[in-house]
Image (cartoon, rainbow, N blue to C red):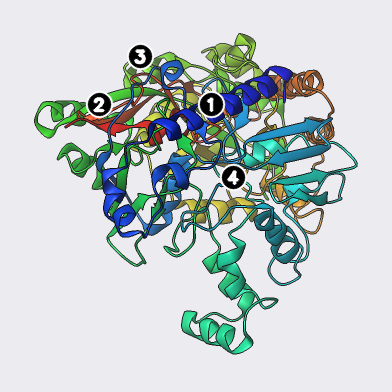
Amino acid sequence: MTRMAVFRGMMHALLGLALATAARAEGLVEIPYLEDQVRSGELLPMAERLPANPLVVDLEALGRTPGRYCCILRTLMESPKDLRMITVYSYARLVGYNEHLELVPDIVESFTVRDNREFTFRLRKGHRWSDGHPFTSEDFRYYWEDVALNDEAGNGSPPAIMMSDGKPPRFEIIDEWTVRYTWDTPNPIFLPAIAGASPLYIYAPAHYLKQFHTRYADPDDLAAKIAAERVDSWAALHTRKARQYRAENPDLPTLGPWSNTTKGPSERYVFARNPYFHRVDPAGQQLPYIDEIAVSIASGDLIPAKTGAGDTDLQSRYLRFDDYTFLKAREADSGYRVLLWRDGTGSRLTLYPNMNIADPIWRRAFRDVRVRRALSLAIDRFEINQQLYYGLATESANSILPASPLYDPRYARAWARHDPALANTLLDEAGFTERSKDGIRLLPDGRPMEIIVETFGEDTSAVDALELITDYWRKIGVGLFIRSSSRDIVRRRLVSGQTMVTLAPGLNTGMAIAAMAPEELAPVSAVQPQWPIWGQHTESIGTSGSAADTEPAKTLLGLYGAWRTSESDAERYRIWRQMLDITADQVLSIGIANQTRQPVVVSKRLRNVPEDAIHAFSPLAYFGVYRPDTFWFEE
């Protein structure tokens, strides 16, 4: 963290304390939704529910206006698994990104970092879980000692993110409100992981979860709970009850702005406001402004139609650019506005040649950079942009966006121009000179050079793009066939070496900064479609898959390892740029266009939603960085 970020954190803390003190002196206007509970004595008044130093959200700096308390915000999801999106959208983190992609305190009052080895978190005194129980260092101790290091609950070792040079941190409780993690070597991934859209949780509501833990629970009572939930062990029960990200357990206390109140299965889930949420507006009034979020479950195919009928107040999930015309036509009659945010991925559609394919001849072909460059150069990105995105996108390789401080236009242009003549020359140089009677190049064993491209079948524009690419590749003597399958099937085929090329979104971290881990640029995960076997090997610490055996992949792994132990922002920036240089030059994925437009449907009564913004899971958490707790409804 930079000195400026530390200074801003200190100023936020001082401002919060001053405003909270002034508000308590003048009195706060109680939230109507909670008035009856306060009147009955079930809840304390607002001033006593807030921590001593709440987080003050600077509405003016965000370009937002003070709101009013009321209303239910409706949204649509495809399945109960999507309840995790409310955790994403709510974006309450110990430390989080602001709109400038700076890491700033959120749930914690302050934090300090020394050499990326020592991380100290200071909690807000008086901060409480949504059920009113104090949030203290005990919640961190419980997670670390009783879950992460427990042989049954956490497999005896912490998450990989909390390991540096193969070693876990030393955990210390300084006092009731302060905890510290110290590694012998730098762990720069730690804070970005905590701030992630899918965050690393290093705390848990100990007071609630101890009833499911063998170390604390009455054995007979715990056995009864295990039987009632039909699970095999106390650890399985504890895991089910403790999922903070998925928000399926309505009894699990939260620190977010809204808490699930509905036990599934259900067709409608209601998230009610957290009476102890730690953020306030500049007047000292507790956030969020919106009382409830109602999540209705509907088929993903029907969500655009239901959105067009006015069945939602805020919707982007399951909407695609090709829904825009329909949604816009219904705008006047259905009480909503259609905004077009910019997509935050490195390329909306990206081709990933599988360098780990089991077929040895195709494996050799896809590992030849001339083949990858040729397949990229053959594509007419301008035509795809005009046909699919009405010219609103930016033709580009799969790389960092201009909004990122790591951006360099060279990355966007690398081997991404339309040059079929050069593509043909490169394929000739790679040895694919023989052709069939219909012009398709032949592999060394006589088979036609025909590529099956697999898609997840979730985006109709993917098939439209591939139909155009079929014509482009045929002009350089390469056939293309399309296979649509479910995401799970495609991933199983990838790991088994059956998939040739996958069409999927590009870099999730199109908005990357040097403080974020460059893990998408190196083979570290089995879900990476260009090198799943190498990624599996890294992910499993060598117990499965196979080690990377090409120079670019080995170099990228080495650079990623160097980033994981880096000691300065300058060093991390340098490593990122080196990795971006290699991935651009080697065309390890083939991007088509980025900054495409994402329809965001917003009720005409809903205020403080940005008109122009970037829609990205990482690091923006879609709506999350834009503070949905400050959204509010007009009368």
Task: State which quadrant residue 556 falls in.
Answer: top right
* Left or right for 427, reference 484: right
Q: Which mark is residue 199?
A: 4
Which of label 4 and label 1 is nearer to you?
A: 1
Amino acid carrying label 4: it is Pro
Identity of the residue drawn at 43% across and 44% down: 257
> Does dot 3 land on a helix, a strand or a loop?
loop
Q: Position of residue 337 (x, y in %)?
A: 22, 26
What is the tally of numbered marks visible in this picture?
A: 4
> Does dot 1 land on a helix, a strand or a loop?
helix
* Left or right for 418, reference 141: left
* Left or right for 599, reference 184: left
Task: State which quadrant residue 75 falls in.
Answer: top left
Count neighbours of disc 4 (C-alpha within 10 A) and say few if under 14, some if 14 to 19, many if 20 or more.
Answer: many
Q: Which mark is residue 338?
A: 2
Which of label 1 and label 3 is nearer to you?
A: 1
Q: Position of residue 384 (x, y in %)?
A: 39, 20
The CA distance from mark 1 to mark 3 is 50 Å
